[in-house]
C-alpha cells in the first residue's frame, strides 16, 4: 500500500483553503489525517471534507509537531507564513506556501510543476516550496512550451483580474455594490477592499505602486517569471482589477527570436500539459472567466499573428485564479513532491 500523509491546511476557512479541501477530495490525495488550521477566532468552527465536518484547530507553533504533520499547505497571508512556517519546517513538514513571503528568497524554490518541476528537489534548503502569484502561474504555463519551441524574447501582458484575488471580503464588496446599484444607492456604497468602486468599473491598480511606476503585482509577474523559467525575459505588465468574481484573464503579446505561425502555436500549446485550446472565433468560442470556474486547466484562445511583425503572436489566456492560480498549483506541487520523495 502506498504511503499516506498527515496534511495540514493553514487558512482552511479562506477562499483558497476551501478550494484546496475540495481539490484534495476530488483527486483522492493520499491523506492519513487532515488537520484544518486557522486563527483563534476561527478555531472550533468546521470545514467540510469528503462529506464530513472537520473541526478547525488553532494555529500554533506546537500543532505541527503534536499532529505529526508531514505536508503543510499555507494560505493565510504572508505574515502568518512568516511566523508559523518555520515551526512547521522544524517539526519535519514540507511547507507549500501560497503567499508572496518566500517567493523571491534565493534558497526557496518557486514552482509551477508544468514548467520547472525539477526545482522541487531544492526544497530541503529551507523546507519550503513557494507557490507563485496567481497571474504568473497561468502565464508561465503558456510561455514555457512556446519558449522551448521558438525562443521567447519579450512578453507584454495586460491582466483582467477577478475580485477573488483579493479574498472573500473583496468578492462580498462587489456583490454588495451591485446590490446597491440595483437599489439606486451605488453612490452611497462603501469601498474598503479596494481604494475605488469596483462595481461597473475597472481599477488599473493591484497592490501598491513602486518607484518605477509599476505596481507590486506587476513587478511580481516580472521577477517571478525570471525565477521560474531560469531566463531573463523582457516583460512589461499592466495589472487591472475587473468586476468579476472568479477567473483571471490575460492578453499576451509575445515576441520571439524567430518567425512564428499561429497554427503552429495552437499545435504546440495543445500538446502542453493542462492547457486547453478554445479558439474558434467564428463560433464565439474563446476563453472567458465564466467558463473556467472550478476548472483545473488553463484556457487559451484568440491566437493570432501580428499584422506587422512575423516574430510576434497575440493570445488570450484565462484560468480560475483560486484553482490554477493557487490551490491546484499547490496540490500539484505536493503531488510532485510525493512522487520525487517516494522514488528515493
Image (tube, rainbow, N blue to C red):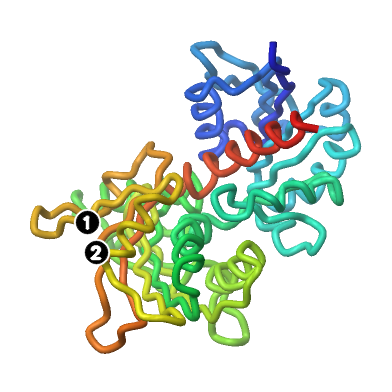
Residue drawn at the location 29% of the way across and 51% of the way down: 277
Q: Quadrant of the C terminus?
A: top right
Residue drawn at the location 71% of the way across and 28% of the way down: 8
Q: Position of residue 261 (x, y in %)?
A: 29, 72
- Rendered position, 333 above or below 155: above
Verify CB contact (< 8 Å) between mark 1 and mark 2: yes
Q: Quadrant of the N terminus?
A: top right
- Rendered position, 202 above or below 342: below
Please indicate whether residue 202 sits to the left or right of residue 98 in the image: left
Extreme residue in the right direction: 90
Given residues 35 and 324, the one toward you in this image is: 324
Tell me which corner region of the image, top left, top right, bottom left or bottom right, holds residue 46. top right
Residue bearing mark 1 = 279
Residue drawn at the location 65% of the way across and 43% of the way down: 76
Disc on res. 302: 2
Q: Position of residue 149 (x, y in %)?
A: 45, 67
Q: Which callout, 1 or 2, points at the residue further toward the start of the chain?
A: 1
Label 1 Cα crowd, 10 Å radius (few <14 / some 14-19 / many 20+): many
Amino acid at each position: 500500500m502506498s504511503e499516506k500523509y498527515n496534511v495540514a491546511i493553514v487558512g482552511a476557512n479562506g477562499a483558497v483553503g476551501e478550494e484546496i479541501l475540495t481539490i484534495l477530495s476530488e483527486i483522492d490525495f493520499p491523506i492519513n489525517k487532515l488537520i484544518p488550521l486557522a486563527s483563534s477566532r476561527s478555531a472550533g468552527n468546521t470545514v467540510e471534507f469528503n462529506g464530513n465536518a472537520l473541526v478547525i484547530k488553532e494555529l500554533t507553533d506546537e500543532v505541527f509537531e503534536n499532529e505529526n504533520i508531514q505536508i503543510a499547505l499555507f494560505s493565510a497571508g504572508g505574515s502568518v507564513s512568516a511566523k508559523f512556517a518555520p515551526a512547521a519546517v522544524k517539526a519535519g513538514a514540507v511547507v507549500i506556501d501560497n503567499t508572496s513571503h518566500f517567493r523571491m528568497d534565493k534558497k526557496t524554490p518557486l514552482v509551477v510543476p508544468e514548467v520547472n518541476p525539477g526545482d522541487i528537489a531544492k526544497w530541503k534548503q529551507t523546507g519550503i516550496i513557494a507557490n507563485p502569484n496567481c497571474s504568473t502561474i497561468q502565464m508561465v504555463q503558456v510561455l514555457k512550451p512556446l519558449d522551448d519551441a521558438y525562443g521567447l524574447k519579450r512578453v507584454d501582458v495586460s491582466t483582467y483580474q477577478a475580485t477573488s484575488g483579493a479574498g472573500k471580503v473583496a468578492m462580498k464588496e462587489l456583490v454588495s455594490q451591485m446590490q446597491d446599484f440595483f437599489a439606486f444607492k451605488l453612490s452611497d456604497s462603501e469601498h474598503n477592499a479596494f481604494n475605488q468602486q469596483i462595481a461597473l468599473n475597472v481599477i488599473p491598480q493591484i497592490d501598491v505602486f513602486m518607484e518605477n511606476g509599476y505596481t507590486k503585482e506587476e513587478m511580481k509577474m516580472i521577477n517571478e517569471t525570471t525565477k521560474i523559467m531560469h531566463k531573463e525575459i523582457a516583460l512589461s505588465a499592466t495589472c487591472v482589477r475587473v468586476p468579476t468574481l472568479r477567473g483571471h484573464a490575460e492578453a499576451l503579446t509575445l515576441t520571439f527570436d524567430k518567425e512564428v505561425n499561429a497554427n503552429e502555436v495552437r499545435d504546440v500549446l495543445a500538446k502542453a500539459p493542462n492547457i486547453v485550446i478554445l479558439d474558434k472565433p467564428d463560433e464565439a468560442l474563446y476563453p472567458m472567466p465564466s467558463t473556467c470556474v472550478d476548472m483545473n486547466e488553463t484556457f487559451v484562445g484568440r491566437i493570432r499573428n501580428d499584422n506587422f511583425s512575423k516574430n510576434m503572436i497575440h493570445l488570450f489566456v484565462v484560468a480560475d485564479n483560486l484553482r490554477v492560480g493557487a490551490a491546484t498549483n499547490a496540490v500539484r506541487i505536493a503531488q510532485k513532491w510525493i512522487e520525487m520523495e517516494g522514488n528515493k
